[in-house]
Image (cartoon, rainbow, N blue to C red):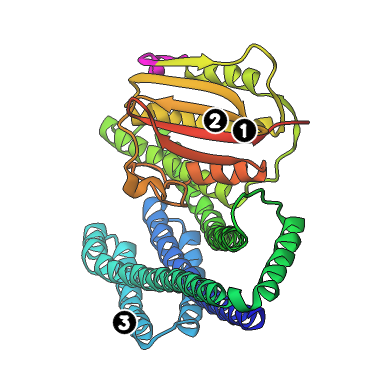
Amino acid sequence: MMIPTLAIFIVLFFVLHKMQEVNREILIKNLSSIIAAYNVENSLLTLKELRANYILDGERKWLDEFEKEVGGFNFWYNKAFEVSNSEDEKDILSDMSIEFSYYLSAHREIMALFNKGQRKQAINILLTKSMGHYNAIYSGCEQLISTNRNVILESESNLKNYAIKSLYISYGIISGFVLMGVILVYLISRSIIEPIREMEQESDKVMPLVTGKREMDSLKERFEIMVNTLKENQQRLILSERRAAIGEIAAGISHELNNPIGVICGFTEFLLKKKEITEADREFIKDIDNEAQRCKKLLRQLLDFAKTPEPVFVETDIKELINDLLRSFRTEKFSNVLIKTDFPQWPLTVMADPVQMRQVLFNVIMNACEAMNFSGNINISINSNDNYLEIKIADSGTGISDSIKNKIFTPFFSTKTKGVGLGLSVCLDIVEKHHGRIAVEDGSNGGSVFIISIPEGK
């Protein structure tokens, strides 16, 4: 009985492993298409910016840079065509190529009018014909990105469904062999009981389990623990690979966009220093500068997510760290937020990176304030539980619905109108690098409770 059982499990494990490999290949292939599409889109944005710079100050260098960037656009367009995964994608890319030729034709027409001094006619063509072709190309890029993202999500869903079916099959196999064991136990009881006891002894060497159940029930419980552990590790691996892939894309996008945004900020600063501009124009330029600064902040968040450093562990007094952090919340902005603490009298020292832990606590407390619209109560308590130091941060907000509770730590998931949804993802990454856990529960009186667990000891 043991031989066919092990053979079936080995086959199931092998097939599941192959499914994971296939899923990973699909992920890498479609990510290549997404990256290429992002770079085509980025080149298009750069072309738009360079032309705008030329229209603003009339310097020839912007047109030279524009011509160079056309080559960059063509490079990434060819790359996107090379890694395309379907005929539909190639059709989209072909339409984009036609629109880009129209876009360049409109550009030359605009430049000719601009150089003749016919600025109004040039801007009219820019806002109508040129923007129409630009929007068509941009829409094609977004369509490519969306198509490949949907393929990745569908592949992950199929893998998850197959894992669930495999789990059910495993349970069915176990149940069948248990039933057979009950029938045969009267005839060959020793040949069944002794191997089971040997399996228990071997499993105790790996994971001791104290149970008062009978042999078969004990074996089933051990197997369920093994399956659940494998399932958790599989989900953790999928999340880790997804986080790494998104981090790579985020780093590339941040690197490419920082320079053009820096140029925008530089020009707005330059324009604001001019005395001859009107007050209305000054306000308009300030709006541009504010939005550019907001983009720079979002890019910094992307880089933080992509390049979270390894923690530098030092002895850290959690009480002192939190008390010092709370000084940041004693400003007019938080005047309607009442923060209460409940800490033990004795020192609470752990090995942690104080800078990173401060970032985690700040993000969670700030989220609590935003959930309450900066008006309500926040209770922070610390206690020891099973060799872990638990920090609980409870707010009096509206709480988190069950439908999104399991998504809040997913990169780029956010219910806010601003931000990119990386705050809690970064928190999860930092806490896991501290060998800890972070979870959220419903509060007893409404609101939410975030629980951050860090291993005790030095």
Magenta highlight range: 330-337
Nearest to the observer: residue 219 or residue 450:
219
Residue 329 horizontal/vertical position (percent): 48, 19
Q: Is residue 392 magenta?
A: no
Cα separation, mark 3 vs mark 1, equals 50 Å
Question: In the image, is residue 331 part of the stretch drawn in magenta?
Answer: yes
Residue 60 location, x and y as percent? 47, 61
Identity of the residue drawn at 38% across and 85% down:
90
Is residue 401 positioned above or below 151 on the image? above
Distance in Å between CA atoms under marks 1 and 2: 6 Å
Q: Amino acid at mark 2?
A: Leu
The percent position of residue 137, horizontal first and vertical second, equals 33, 71
Q: Position of residue 449 (x, y in %)?
A: 44, 31
Toward the viewer: 197 or 377? Answer: 197
Q: Which numbered marker is on residue 357?
A: 1
- The answer to whether residue 221 is visible is yes
Residue count near mark 3 (Cα–Cα under 10 Å), binned few <14, some 14–19, many ≥20: some
Q: Earlier in the sequence, mark 2 or mark 3?
A: 3
Q: Check if mark 1's residue and mark 2's residue have beta carbons within 8 Å.
A: yes
Task: Find disc 3 in the rendering and name its residue.
Answer: 95
Q: How many marks?
A: 3
